[in-house]
Amino acid sequence: MLVALTVAVSVAALALAAWCGFAAFRDQPTKDWHFIGMAVVTLLALVQLVIGVVQLARGEKAEEGATIFIAYLIGAFAAVPAAGFLSLAERTRWGSATVAAGAVVLAVLEVRLHDIWGG
């Protein structure tokens, strides 16, 4: 697994969490700019998913097993989009809080992915 990409996804996710958390603090729903940020974080997670699957296909091994590694990759990829869809249903400050929570979950999943790979 590429450590630099894992760090980039984590930092981007935490920046999104802070941004949406600040919006929730200011009693604002998610706005178009937040969705652009979610798209950027999701794109980084997609790149990580593709690279992780390619590395497994090349024969590299995750320390704790390929199945759990792929499951965490898919979960990491889905965390922010799922929170984004929930924020569309809740057009209050709680929508922004939901995205912030989803981004924090992604950052935690990144730490776990690093551990599963053998970091």
Image (cartoon, rainbow, N blue to C red):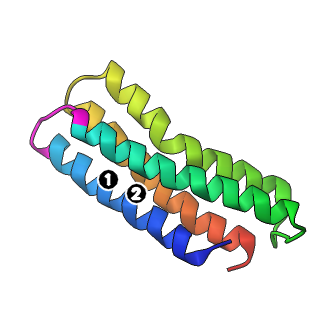
Q: Is residue 30 magenta?
A: yes
Image location (x, y in percent) of residue 25: 14, 45
Q: In front here: 21 or 5?
A: 5
Which residue appears at 25% of the width and 46% of the height? 20
Point out the stretch of residues depicted in magenta.
25-32
Amino acid type indicated by mark 2: Ala
Image location (x, y in percent) of residue 16: 32, 53
The majority secondary structure of the magenta stretch comes to loop
At numbered mark 1, what does the secondary structure look like: helix, strand or loop?
helix
The C terminus, quarter of image: bottom right
Which residue appears at 57% of the width and 46% of the height? 77
Q: Return the residue at label 2.
A: 13
Which residue appears at 62% of the width and 65% of the height? 112
Q: In front here: 7 or 108?
A: 7
- Side of 106 relative to 2 (left or right): left
Image location (x, y in percent) of residue 88: 33, 23
Answer with the quarter of the image where residue 102 lies: top left
At numbered mark 2, what does the secondary structure look like: helix, strand or loop?
helix
- Side of 76 relative to 96 (left or right): right
Q: Looking at this rendering, what residue extends furthest in the top direction?
A: 89
What numbered label is drawn on residue 93?
Answer: none
Which residue appears at 43% of the width and 36% of the height? 83
- Side of 97 relative to 29 (left or right): right
